[in-house]
Image (cartoon, coloured by chain):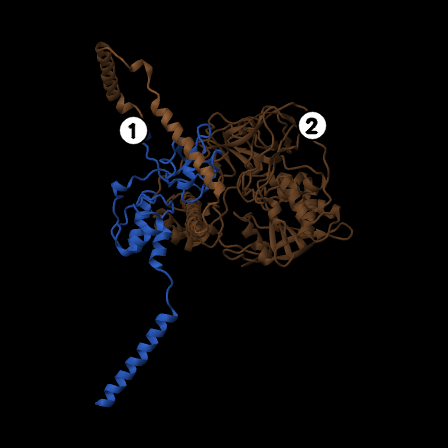
Chain colours: A brown, B blue
């Protein structure tokens, strides 16, 4: 199927030339109630940290960063507080100036309700930046640029928080055809990308140009859903003013989940990335508009990623967008929008893909695109789950071309191998299947369960394989040591035999000289004397005893013997 | 008649030669069944099965000398997988070989350790570092939780600590629909 979209690029004299660009269609998708208007009325409010910030160290995919500050340290805004642990990781920075009061376990914005290591910063209210130094990436090698972005903590702000530096290499061919910038923002309620494009379009265009250069991409396409006319206009205007070539703003039809990376790539380029392949293998890479803006800030201004735009919507009096420093409590943010009294939960993300927060005072992190305030009225509890009637509605709407009902059967029955065969891991958990299911089956919950079980098993399998390898190596080493010992012993025995043979040979030598004989005679005479002296000495006090004394001595001896007998189990054996 | 016998005999010789050749040419190294069983076993090398390691136990199962329910760390799931592989009945874990415990790793109390190296010698996977009269410590990532280091310690400074769940290892739970009491629902 093919739809035509309007695309615009800057004309020579600033006139918008409108041409038809061929767009493609992705399978499935739904049209939920978007409810985005409520939060786009006000401009972005920049929030400064007033109460203490709880900055989790682990905010991206990959290894958790190592803390490099400790309690009592004074930190400046933008100062690194967590160093990336290896290459698949991303640094974390102080989002305001102040004093580190603790580095401790705190509740994470994660469904599990578990804690992880966080840096707690008490702001001093001065919001004092560390000295900022723009990065000249043209003078640096690609590796240096990637290391710089890793240390600037830039991660994908679309929700997956994948470290951006890992995506900024042009793949096997050394160049890309298309860089896709994702401004679709298809999930209901969320408008953080929309307002960012309206207000900071110039930065996004600059970031896009930087990325296009780094990736050696022929063109960059910025895909925006057609329900954001203000953002489209702002982006086009900024593009026109900047005069940067090879970037186009493309309007795509509004349909959930057009903002999925694979779906947007399909819509803009017609490329369907097959199972198990990367989009760079097909000359395409995709970034979120927020990420483009963060890259512009990191490279052009030297600012690390310490804040992001967050939509607060749902059961509130006035839904708005804020620029929030990481570590601020979600409760604090929600309170600025007059939450209604029946509020009973906070959801991080939108109503389709969002996750329930374990408490209201969890911090805003890099993955927080939206704080959705919920109430029983706004999100009524789901009706009871009914048996699957195999209607196939879920397969019709699945944007990943999967068969959700099959995945459901296998996940439910815990037949994980089969679920993987049906490409469970291609599921993007968009929730379309559960949205249309007439039996109200929480399908995504089953997929999440199956995925985490499979991951856990794979981890177990890897560690078992490692243990086997180490065990086998140990056996090998013990065997080798045994052989070495045996060889050493054999060598020693051989040496001993040689020595004995030498001794025998010595004995067979001619008899001793007269001098040696004289010495020997002297020694034996002295020994004889000593023996005679020892024999002649008799203890004086035991001679000439009376019979009474003799009796006393024998009584004492008897008592001694008795005591020795009693003490025997407790004493070390007499030598 | 003789011709027919000769033809049959010739056929037998040719086929026999072909089979003999194939047996040599496509010989399977090792016992694939042992490998498959070994892949299911948890590789803790704890010896609770009464064999000196996972591989010997796998060999014993393959030979039919050992039963499939002697591996406590593998637990119920391990038994089920072995039963699937070998086409046998699923059994309860044999009590004499131990009980299924949550995965734990050894922990050395460094205040108490005297540096005797006995635990290092006992560890089947080389997960303890240290030297004579130097403090020892466990490499937790590589510890299989076999408990073999616990009995040799002369000062009882090794304890088994169950692995706590963290954000990384947390798993989504099986979806369960919560039932509400009828009285509450009608109220």
Query: Mark 2 falls on what kind of element?
Result: loop
What is the total number of numbered labels drawn onto the structure image?
A: 2
The residue closer to the viewer here, B8 or A285, is B8
Q: Chain of mark 2?
A: A
In x, y percent, where is residue B74?
34, 45
Residue that carries the numbered disc 2 in the rendered image: A128
Determine the residue positioned at 33% across, 31% down: B185
Tell me the quadrant of the picture where the C terminus of chain B can be found.
top left
In x, y percent, where is residue A190?
56, 39
The residue closer to the viewer here, A1 or B161, is B161
Q: Is residue B180 left or right of residue A192?
A: left
Query: Mark 1 falls on what kind of element?
Result: helix
- As drawn, B129 above or below A564: below
Q: Is residue A191 left or right of residue A541?
A: right
Q: Chain of mark 1?
A: B
Q: Is residue A427 left or right of residue A241?
A: left
The residue closer to the viewer here, A346 or A88, is A88
Q: Report the disc number at residue B156.
A: none
Determine the residue positioned at 67% across, 38% down: A199
Q: Report the disc number at residue B183.
A: 1
- As drawn, B96 above or below B82: above
Label 1 and label 2: CA atoms lie apart by 59 Å
Residue A552 seen in this snapshot: yes
In x, y percent, where is residue B69?
27, 47
Residue A224 seen in this snapshot: no
Tell me the quadrant of the picture where the N terminus of chain B can be found.
bottom left
């Amino acid at each position: 199927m093919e739809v035509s979209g309007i695309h615009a690029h800057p004309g020579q004299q600033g006139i918008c030339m409108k041409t038809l660009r061929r767009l493609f269609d992705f399978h499935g998708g739904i049209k939920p109630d978007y409810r985005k208007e409520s939060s786009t009325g006000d401009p972005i409010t920049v929030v400064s940290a007033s109460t203490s910030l709880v900055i989790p160290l682990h905010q991206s995919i990959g290894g958790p960063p190592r803390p490099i500050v400790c309690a009592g340290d004074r930190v400046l805004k933008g100062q690194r507080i967590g160093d990336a642990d290896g290459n698949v990781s991303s640094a974390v920075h102080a989002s305001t100036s102040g004093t580190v009061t603790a580095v401790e376990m705190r509740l994470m914005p994660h469904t599990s309700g578990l804690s992880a290591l966080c840096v707690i910063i008490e702001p001093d209210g001065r919001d004092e930046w560390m000295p900022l130094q723009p990065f000249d990436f043209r003078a640096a090698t690609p590796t240096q640029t990637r290391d710089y972005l890793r240390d600037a903590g830039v991660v994908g702000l679309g929700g997956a928080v994948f470290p951006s530096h890992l995506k900024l290499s042009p793949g096997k061919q050394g160049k890309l055809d298309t860089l896709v910038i994702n401004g679709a923002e298809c999930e209901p309620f969320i408008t953080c990308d929309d307002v960012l494009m309206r207000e900071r379009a110039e930065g996004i265009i600059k970031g896009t140009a930087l990325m296009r250069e780094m990736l050696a991409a022929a063109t960059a396409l910025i895909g925006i859903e057609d329900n954001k006319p203000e953002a489209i206009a702002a982006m086009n205007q900024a593009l026109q003013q900047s005069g940067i070539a090879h970037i186009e703003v493309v309007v795509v039809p509004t349909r959930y989940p057009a903002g999925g990376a694979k779906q947007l790539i399909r819509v803009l380029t017609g490329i369907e990335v097959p199972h198990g392949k990367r989009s760079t293998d097909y000359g395409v890479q995709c970034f979120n508009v927020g990420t483009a803006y963060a890259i512009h800030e990191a490279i052009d201004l030297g600012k690390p990623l310490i804040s992001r735009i967050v939509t607060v919507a749902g059961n509130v009096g006035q839904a708005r967008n804020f620029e929030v420093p990481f570590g601020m409590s979600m409760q604090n943010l929600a309170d600025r929008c007059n939450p209604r009294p029946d509020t009973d939960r906070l959801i991080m993300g939108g109503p389709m893909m969002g996750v329930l927060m374990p408490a209201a005072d969890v911090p805003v992190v890099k993955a927080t695109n939206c704080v959705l305030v919920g109430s029983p009225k706004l999100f009524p509890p789901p009706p009871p789950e009914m048996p699957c009637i195999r209607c196939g509605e879920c397969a019709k709407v699945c944007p990943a071309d999967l068969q959700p009902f099959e995945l459901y059967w296998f996940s439910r029955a815990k037949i994980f191998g089969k679920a993987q065969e049906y490409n469970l891991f291609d599921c993007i958990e968009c929730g379309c299947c559960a949205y249309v299911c007439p039996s109200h089956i929480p399908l995504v919950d089953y997929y999440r369960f199956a995925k985490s079980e499979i991951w856990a098993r794979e981890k177990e399998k890897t560690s078992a394989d490692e243990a086997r390898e180490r065990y086998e190596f140990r056996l090998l080493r013990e065997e080798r040591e045994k052989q070495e010992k045996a060889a050493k012993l054999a060598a020693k025995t051989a040496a001993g035999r040689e020595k004995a043979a030498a001794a025998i040979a010595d004995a067979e030598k001619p008899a001793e000289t007269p001098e040696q004989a004289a010495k020997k005679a002297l020694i034996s005479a002295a020994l004889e004397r000593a023996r005679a002296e020892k024999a002649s000495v008799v203890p004086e006090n035991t001679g000439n005893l009376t019979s009474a004394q003799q009796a006393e001595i024998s009584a004492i001896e008897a008592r001694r013997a008795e005591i020795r007998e009693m003490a025997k189990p407790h004493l070390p054996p007499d030598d | 008649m003789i011709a027919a016998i000769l033809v049959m005999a010739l056929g037998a010789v040719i086929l026999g030669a072909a089979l003999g050749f194939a047996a040599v040419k496509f010989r399977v190294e090792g016992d694939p069944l042992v490998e498959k069983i070994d892949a299911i076993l948890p590789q803790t090398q704890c010896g609770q099965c009464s064999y000196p390691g996972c591989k010997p136990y796998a060999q014993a199962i393959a030979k039919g000398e050992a039963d499939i329910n002697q591996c406590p760390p593998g637990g119920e799931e391990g038994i089920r997988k072995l039963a699937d592989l070998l086409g046998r009945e699923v059994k309860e874990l044999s009590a004499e070989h131990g009980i299924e415990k949550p995965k734990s790793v050894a922990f050395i109390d460094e205040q108490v350790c005297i540096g005797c190296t006995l635990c290092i010698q006992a560890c089947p996977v080389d997960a303890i570092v240290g030297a004579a009269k130097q403090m020892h410590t466990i490499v937790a990532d590589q510890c299989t939780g076999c408990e073999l280091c616990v009995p040799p310690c002369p000062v009882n400074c090794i304890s088994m600590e169950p692995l706590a769940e963290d954000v990384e290892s947390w798993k989504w739970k099986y979806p369960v629909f919560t039932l509400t009491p009828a009285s509450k629902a009608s109220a």
